Image: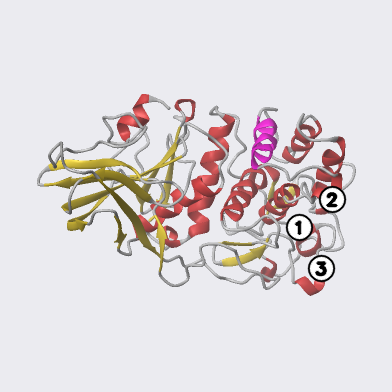
């Protein structure tokens, strides 16, 4: 782990563990203590039901619930001296240490978490990206908190939009273990939630990425939005270089005749269902896929919500109507005719990624596809330096064909999923 990240973590000691105080005499018998941190979490995009009647599996937080703040940094002081400091366990949200006697303490929680060897840090620097670690972290202090010998004390951060987003970000890193030695800065500003703004990606070669969560709407309380931006950051950090990314928009103008209810027309910006060039679907579909993985089991139909609309990761329409070949783009946006070359929707892309990731072992007699191999598909496609906004599906097919970790059966199955979901607009013979 790079020194700059450890300094950022407010630690003068190594990342290994704690700073221990010496409040008791040397001959006193040491006792064990445990402090656990929880946060009140409530997300407006939870428990919404998609066309198949399926919702997500985890963090069902339409009402306020308490969740561990995983890996968060604590400083525990008593009478002005530090008793213990360090990161809570990323699985439990608890920090254990030894001292002696019942202690009256102040427990300060800072908005930086260590998940494995990765960090997520919420700061007050808004959209600042011209420094690697902008602003300062937020803190919540629990004053005059008594810690009893050999007991666990739980403190709970009250409902707060900033802490809500930060806790969600830590969970998103923890749930999808896929990279190491990375840091994500999370700022809050009255601008669109984004991971690609100003110089937010310019620190990638330093293993750091910036994301921004909008304060002007409810995005800090939209878990899929936070996880989506985390997904963008993780995929770019895994790729490990800046530049050569697919354009934000290829400027596609929908030419079909579907009713507005089909969602095929974008209003200036893309939507999950709007018809777009593949340059958009390639990366936005991947970030959606990442967010869906955070809150769903891989073995079930999964739920994903974006822009207030719930979607199934398995079907583009109700379960009763099945999931016919051609996805949303062919069946809804261009029924009865072929879409333009290299045009599909973000939801078709995200279902393609989900289909490959959840490829049944029985399909090829191989183990489940690791998430790291999905990142390989993303990174290997980008490495081909795709020049055109409508050919990303072709380059991705090439990347899959050359993926050394895939068997020939897995490659054939993945190509079939490209066709089935009409990634690229057409199927068979791009």
* Image vertical order of residue 399 relative to residue 413, above or below: above
Residue 238 appearing in the image: yes
The residue lying at 60 percent from left, 45 percent from top is 249
> In this rendering, would 312 be left or right of 5?
right
Badge number at residue 322: 3
Q: Residue furthest right?
A: 429
Q: Nearer the viewer, residue 427 or 343?
A: 427
The kind of secondary structure element at disc 1 is helix
Q: Residues within 10 Å of mark 1 (few under 14, many from 20)?
A: many
Which residue is label 1 attached to?
329
User: Where is residue 389 shown, x and y percent of the image?
Assistant: 69, 39
Badge number at residue 362: 2
Q: Nearer the viewer, residue 99 or 317?
A: 99
* Range of residues picked out in magenta: 371-382
* Image vertical order of residue 254 relative to residue 241, above or below: below
Q: Residue 26: which quarter of the image?
A: top left
User: Where is residue 193 shown, x and y percent of the image?
Assistant: 45, 51
Is 238 magenta? The answer is no
Main SS, magenta region, reads: helix
The residue lying at 10 percent from left, 43 percent from top is 80
Q: Quadrant of the C terminus?
A: top right
Distance (Cα) linking label 3 and label 2: 21 Å
């Amino acid at each position: 782990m790079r020194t700059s990240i450890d300094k950022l973590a407010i630690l003068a000691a190594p990342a290994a563990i704690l700073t221990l105080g010496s409040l008791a005499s040397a001959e006193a018998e040491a006792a064990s203590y445990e402090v656990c941190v929880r946060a009140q979490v409530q997300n407006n995009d939870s428990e919404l039901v998609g066309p198949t009647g399926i919702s997500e599996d985890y963090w069902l937080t339409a009402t306020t619930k308490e969740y561990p703040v995983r890996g968060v940094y604590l400083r525990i002081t008593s009478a002005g001296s530090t008793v213990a400091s360090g990161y809570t366990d990323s699985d439990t949200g608890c920090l254990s240490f030894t001292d002696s006697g019942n202690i009256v303490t102040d427990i300060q929680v800072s908005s930086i978490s260590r998940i494995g060897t990765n960090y997520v840090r919420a700061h007050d620097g808004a959209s600042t990206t011209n420094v690697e670690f902008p602003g300062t972290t937020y803190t919540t202090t629990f004053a005059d908190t008594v810690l009893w010998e050999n007991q666990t004390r739980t403190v709970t951060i009250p409902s707060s939009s900033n802490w809500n987003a930060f806790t969600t970000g830590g969970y998103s890193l923890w749930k999808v273990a896929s990279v190491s030695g990375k840091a994500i800065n999370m700022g809050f500003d009255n601008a669109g939630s984004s991971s690609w703004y100003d110089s937010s990606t310019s620190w990638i070669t330093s293993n750091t990425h910036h994301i921004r969560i909008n304060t002007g709407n409810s995005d800090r309380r939209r878990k899929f939005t936070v996880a989506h931006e985390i997904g963008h950051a993780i995929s770019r950090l895994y790729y490990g270089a800046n530049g050569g990314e697919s354009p934000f928009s290829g400027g596609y103008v929908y030419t079909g005749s579907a009713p507005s209810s089909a969602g095929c027309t974008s209003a200036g910006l893309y939507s999950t269902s709007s018809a777009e060039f593949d340059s958009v679907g390639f990366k936005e579909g991947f970030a959606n896929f990442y967010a869906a993985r955070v809150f769903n089991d891989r073995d079930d139909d999964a739920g994903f919500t974006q822009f207030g609309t719930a979607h199934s990761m398995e079907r583009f329409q109700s379960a009763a109507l099945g999931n016919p070949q051609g996805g949303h783009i062919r069946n809804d946006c261009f029924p009865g005719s072929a879409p333009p070359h290299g045009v599909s929707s973000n939801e078709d892309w995200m279902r393609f990624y989900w289909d490959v990731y959840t490829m049944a072992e029985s399909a090829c007699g191989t183990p489940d596809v690791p998430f790291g191999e999905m990142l390989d598909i993303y990174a290997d496609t980008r490495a081909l330096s795709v020049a055109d906004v409508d050919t990303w599906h072709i380059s991705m097919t090439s990347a899959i064909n050359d993926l050394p970790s895939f068997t020939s059966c897995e490659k054939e199955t993945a190509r079939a999923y490209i066709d089935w979901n009409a990634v690229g607009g057409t199927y068979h013979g791009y």
